[in-house]
Image: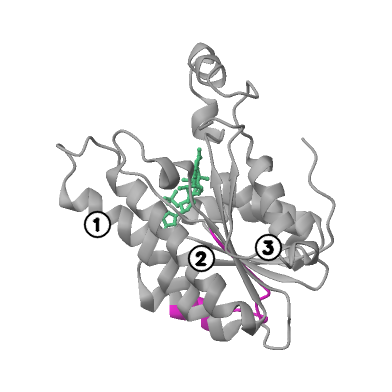
Amino acid sequence: MKNINFSFTNKNAVVTGGASGIGFEITRSFLTAGGNVSIWDYSEQALNNAKTELAPYANQIHLQQIDVTNRESVAKAAAALPWAVDILVNNAGITRDKSFAKMGAEDWDAVISTNLTGLFNVTKTLLEKFNASSTHKRIINISSVVGLYGNFGQTNYAAAKAGVIGMTKTWGKELGRKGFTSNAIAPGFIMTAMTKAMPKEVLEGMASKVPVVRLGETEDIANAVLFLASEQASYINGTVLSVDGGIVL
Ligand code: NDP
């Protein structure tokens, strides 16, 4: 699949969870479009792999091991940023799926602290690290169709992702006059390394339930992120863009 053709030369992005899965594709897309990316990720292994794979862009990347749930860790990463921020993509997220009857408080706490409080921690800390003179400041939050419609076994995840939508809209109202737009993307089922390892029949069965009869690729999300981050999207604020092949229609 081709990447959308925007230029991000001289633009600086922070992508949380940017070393693997969807976040890695977002990172790679900004880099190929000429931007600089600070990759904020928990996983040392994923950061090392990203460094190797993104070697051709070595002078455009800045790697930072970070835990978005830990405010000290976030503050340290923000202090180490080599440039002012133009674009923040809040992408880091986890799942701890169980039916509500079986879901423990630790499953709730882990998902809420990463997928909801993590966005508060990162965005709050980075607000003053944005390029003050820019009129194209961007916050893009990765939510989920589950945040819009709920899902069996995902009380914690659905609550966090719905909360992300509330934050996105509030920031759209509060920060618009300060040169920001704030938008969310709600991906459907997206193929990552983990899901690609599932049996072919299972994947085909899932694809058959999607109106466009395929599962999403990480590029589908990265393309939507690049569009919302572009200057051309400057009048889109506080919206939730579903990128799901129409699965919830
Ligand atoms: P991955 O698990 O592939 O990547 C997420 C990355 O974030 C990992 O490197 C992970 O590290 C990192 N991370 C996890 N917790 C933290 C933390 N506390 N601080 C910093 N980094 C952290 O996930 P996906 O690419 O599948 O998902 C990316 C986003 O897209 C998530 O917000 C997810 O909820 C959302 N999404 C995904 C869908 C899908 O089908 N894949 C569908 C809808 C939404 P580690 O590996 O160590 O945990």
Disc marking residue 169? 2
Q: Which residue is mark 1?
A: 109
Pointer 2 local density, CA inside 10 Å: few below 14, some 14–19, many at least 20: some
Q: Position of residue 34 (x, y in %)?
A: 82, 62
Which is nearer the N-term, disc 1 or disc 2?
1
Q: Position of residue 237 (x, y in %)?
A: 63, 65
Asked if the residues shown at circle 1 and circle 3 are in contact, with their CB atoms under 8 angstroms apart, the answer is: no
Disc marking residue 158? none
In-front residue for pair 181/58: 181
Asked if the residues shown at circle 1 and circle 2 are in contact, with their CB atoms under 8 angstroms apart, the answer is: no
For image coordinates 76% across by 71% down, the residue present is 11
The reply to whether the magenta stretch includes residue 78 is yes
Q: How far apart are the alpha carbons under marks 1 and 3? A: 32 Å
Q: How far apart are the alpha carbons under marks 1 and 2? A: 23 Å
Residue 71: name its quadrant: bottom left
26 relative position to 106: left or right = right
The stretch of residues the image draws in magenta is 75-90
Badge nearest the viewer, 1 or 3? 3
Question: Helix, strand or loop at disc 3?
Answer: loop
Which is nearer the N-term, disc 2 or disc 3?
2
Residue 35: name its quadrant: bottom right
Residue 165 vertical position relative to residue 186 in the rendered view, above or below: below
Badge nearest the viewer, 1 or 2? 2
For image coordinates 75% across by 58% down, the residue present is 31
Q: Which residue is mark 3?
A: 236
Quadrant of the frame with the C terminus:
top right
Q: How far apart are the alpha carbons under marks 2 and 3? A: 11 Å
Q: Position of residue 242 (x, y in %)?
A: 58, 44
The reply to whether the magenta stretch includes residue 50 is no
Quadrant of the frame with the N terminus:
top right
Task: Give the residue type at disc 3.
Answer: Ile
